[in-house]
Amino acid sequence: MANVVVTLRIMPQSTEVNLSEIEAEAKKEIIKFCNSQEFKAQIEPIAFGLKALNLMFVMDESKGSTEQLEKKITDIDGVESVEVTDVRRAIG
């Protein structure tokens, strides 16, 4: 099976939420879910001071759906929602 690169957009509940703490907790959940050690995090301005955390990671496509992972990340304190915004096969 091939590897896929998954991008998650994590929206905080408010502008006061510490995105660094959410990032650390989300990475722990990703490691538990698919044992990935390859991450890229990016902060994206949304509106009125609200920022989203985009987390990219690599996983084996045989793992299937990320639905369970999304639910675990949504349960992190301060997270409003989690959405998969991109999935593509890794080349190379």
Image (spheres, rainbow, N blue to C red):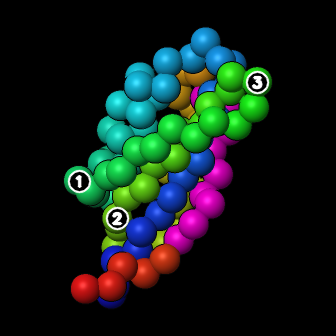
Main secondary structure along the magenta-highlighted residues: strand
Q: Nearer the viewer, mark 3 or mark 1?
A: 3
Magenta-tinted stretch: 79-87
Residue bearing mark 3: 48
Amino acid type at circle 3 is Phe
* Residue 86 picture location, percent across and down: 57, 66
Residue 17 lies left or right of residue 20; in this view the side is: right
Mark 2, residues whose alpha carbon is within 10 Å: few (<14), some, or many (≥20)? Answer: many
- Choose between 31 and 8: the one closer to the eye: 8
Quarter holding the N terminus? Answer: bottom left
In this view, the residue farthest toward the right is 48
Residue bearing mark 2: 58
**Is residue 68 at least partly visible in the picture?**
no
- Choose between 25 and 40: the one closer to the eye: 40
Amino acid type at circle 2 is Val
Q: Is residue 38 magenta?
A: no
* Residue 63 picture location, percent across and down: 41, 71
Earlier residue among tags 2 and 3: 3
Residue bearing mark 1: 37
Q: Nearer the viewer, mark 2 or mark 3?
A: 3
Q: Secondary structure under badge 1?
A: loop
Query: Based on the displayed image, in which of its 4 quarters is residue 67 positioned?
Result: bottom right
Q: Residue at x 65, y 18 (%)?
A: 15
